[in-house]
Amino acid sequence: MTGDEAKRAILAVGDGRGFVVQGAHERFVITAAHCLPFLPPCASNSFAEQRTYKALLGSVGTEPTVWAECLFADPVGDIAVLGPSERPDLFSAYEELTGAAATLSIVESPSETPAKLLSLDDHWFDCRVRRYGGPLWISDAAKSICSRLSGSPILTDDWCAIGIICSGSDVTIRSRPRG
């Protein structure tokens, strides 16, 4: 994979971002849970309508228009997994958007590694990632990390996702590791 291909895996999720991964039979979008307009109910028997978000997904730089269903959300870990709506009339738009996207692989984060982040102006920039227990900590970022980068992947030098950005400021950022 190249940097340009990795960019194609990143989507707009509300005011933040997410990235596409390939499941066994369909594609999913991984994002920060706080990028969702609301958290779904804590009930395994909730209705799909209670977990479905209208006009949540889109290409980066465009207004989101694609509906998605929340399949998993962890408000403490600040991570969510989105999939297509069960509604047939909405399924094809999700499939079209995610089908045109590249997919990222998720790998376990080393305890310390150089990493890459995608800026709001669509350029990759370097940072350093350290794992302390569970969370990843980003430091030495070549550019500022703002809240609109929430949900963006943290990538290794070989373009694999090791975490997601969960918040932003001009200081060290806490994020969730993958793996």
Image (tube, grey):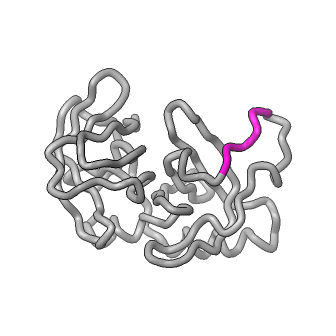
Classify 58 as above or below 156. Answer: below
Taking the image as shown, residue 113 lies to the left or right of residue 136, namely left
40 inside magenta stretch: yes
Q: Quadrant of residue 40?
A: top right
Report if residue 143 lies within the magenta region.
no
| Residue 178 sits in quarter | top left
Q: What stretch is highlighted in magenta?
A: 38-43
Percent of width and height locating residue 157: 19, 53
Please name whichever residue, 145 or 156, is drawn nearer the observer in this view of the structure: 145
Residue 111: horizontal and vertical position, in percent? 22, 29
Query: Residue at horizontal 25%, vertical 67%?
Result: 2
Query: Which quadrant holds the C terminus?
Result: top left
Q: Nearer the viewer, residue 21 or 40?
A: 40
User: Which residue occupies 29% across, 62% down?
Assistant: 118
Q: x, y percentage for residue 103? A: 44, 61
Outermost residue toward the front in this view: 170
Location of residue 67 (image quadrant): bottom right
Residue 164 % position (x, y): 39, 46
Left or right of 79 in this view: 176: left
Q: Is 34 placed left or right of 137 in the picture?
A: right
Q: In this view, does 135 lie to the left or right of 57?
A: left
The residue that appears at 32% across and 21% down in the rendered structure is 133
Residue drawn at x 22%, y 33% as measured from the top left: 130
- As drawn, which residue projects farthest toward the bottom? 62
Q: Which residue lies furthest to the top in this view?
A: 133
Main secondary-structure element of the magenta-colored stretch: loop
Q: In which quarter of the image is the N terminus?
A: bottom left
- The number of discs equals 0
